[in-house]
Image: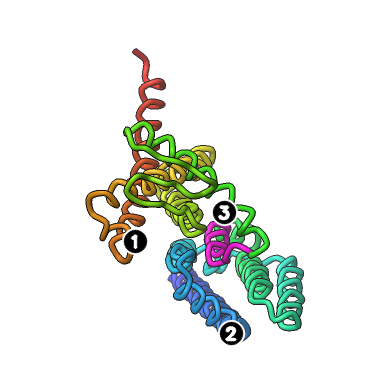
């Protein structure tokens, strides 16, 4: 009887110690979260304003939401009492702090975002070690979609995309029997002139489609190389649907000119992004079915 009582007491002690440890971990997480928000609040506000005001940052609205959802699902890697942190977390936090100081001196929100990434990675290391950082790699990577394309690279990316889209759209019009003349990024049709400006380069749809494909690959594919393949498939898909959007704008300009500008024109653009995502989804499904059939003996 005394043995049973002793065992029961030991179990109760272990349970109370575990609960105490869990409370300590939750308190540590709360403190780190509050510190991150307080320190990087100006950066978060500026990033929110950028996402709301910029037409090129539509994916930036969804990125923090999806990242937070994935992190919440993986939270046990940091909340279990058995997890131990890594001293490397200090190096990450110090690096984030130094980048934050540089961001303040240079008045750069981009530097502040990098500082936040390093600080957040340091917190993960502190709470759950390298396993936690590994599990939280995807949420950290998704936060890069809140970064705008640097001005230095923007023109270097959009100009080749503009010329490529214009050239392919010219070929599409010719195949459809339309008379078209191309000069640079301008397409002259018999009924209208189409200017493929920076906003029509396809970069906007490429970034949005790439983001949605990365998220889709994470949730619906387990093999790493297939995830990379799905993400890579978004690039040709975005280029093709952008050419289709330009071509459809030229066709609509002949029969329904009101659809070539304003809100209706934006609807056509989002319809093209949706079509591109569906194309990648069908590609993945067909690819999976083909590999399954090859794996099955005849």
Question: Tag 3: Cα neighbours inside 10 Å, few (<14), some, or many (≥20)?
Answer: some
Asked whether 2 falls inside the magenta stretch, the response is no
Q: In this rendering, is residue 33 above or below 130?
A: below
Q: In this rendering, is residue 225 above or below 43?
A: above
Where is residue 196 drawn, in percent x and y? 47, 53
Determine the residue located farthest toward the front in the rendered image: 190
Residue matched to label 2: 42
Residue matched to label 1: 266
Where is residue 202 drawn, in percent x and y? 47, 52
Residue matched to label 3: 158
State which quarter of the image contains the C terminus.
top left
SS for dot 3: helix
Label whose residue precedes the other's in the sequence (3 or 2)? 2
SS for dot 1: helix
Where is residue 40 drawn, in percent x and y? 61, 81
Label whose residue precedes the other's in the sequence (1 or 2)? 2
Pair 3/2: label in front: 3
At x 60% / y 52%, what residue is drawn? 157
The residue range painted magenta reads 137-150
């Amino acid at each position: 009887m005394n043995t049973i009582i002793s065992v029961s007491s030991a179990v109760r002690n272990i349970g109370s110690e575990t609960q105490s440890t869990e409370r300590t971990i939750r308190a540590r997480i709360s403190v780190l979260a509050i510190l991150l928000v307080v320190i990087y609040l100006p950066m978060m506000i500026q990033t929110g304003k950028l996402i709301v005001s910029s037409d090129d940052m539509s994916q930036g609205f969804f990125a923090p939401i999806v990242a937070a959802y994935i992190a919440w699902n993986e939270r046990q890697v940091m909340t279990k009492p058995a997890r131990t942190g890594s001293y490397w977390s200090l190096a990450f936090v110090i690096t984030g702090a130094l980048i934050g100081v540089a961001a303040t001196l240079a008045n750069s929100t981009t530097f502040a975002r990098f500082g936040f990434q390093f600080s957040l990675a340091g917190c993960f290391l502190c709470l759950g070690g390298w396993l936690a950082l590994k599990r939280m790699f995807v949420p950290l990577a998704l936060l890069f979609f809140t970064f705008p394309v640097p001005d230095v690279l923007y023109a270097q990316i959009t100009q080749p995309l503009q010329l490529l889209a214009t050239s392919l759209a010219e070929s599409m019009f010719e195949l459809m029997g339309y008379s078209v003349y191309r000069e640079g990024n301008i397409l002259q049709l018999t009924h209208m002139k189409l200017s493929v400006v920076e906003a029509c380069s396809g970069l906007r749809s490429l970034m949005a489609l790439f983001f949605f494909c990365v998220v889709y690959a994470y949730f619906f594919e387990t093999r790493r190389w297939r995830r990379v393949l799905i993400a890579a498939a978004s690039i040709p898909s975005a280029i093709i649907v952008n050419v289709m959007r330009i071509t459809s704008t030229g066709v609509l300009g002949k029969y329904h000119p009101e659809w070539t500008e304003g809100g209706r024109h934006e609807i056509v653009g989002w319809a093209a992004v949706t079509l591109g995502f569906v194309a990648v989804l069908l590609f993945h499904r067909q690819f999976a079915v083909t590999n399954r059939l090859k794996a099955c003996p005849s």
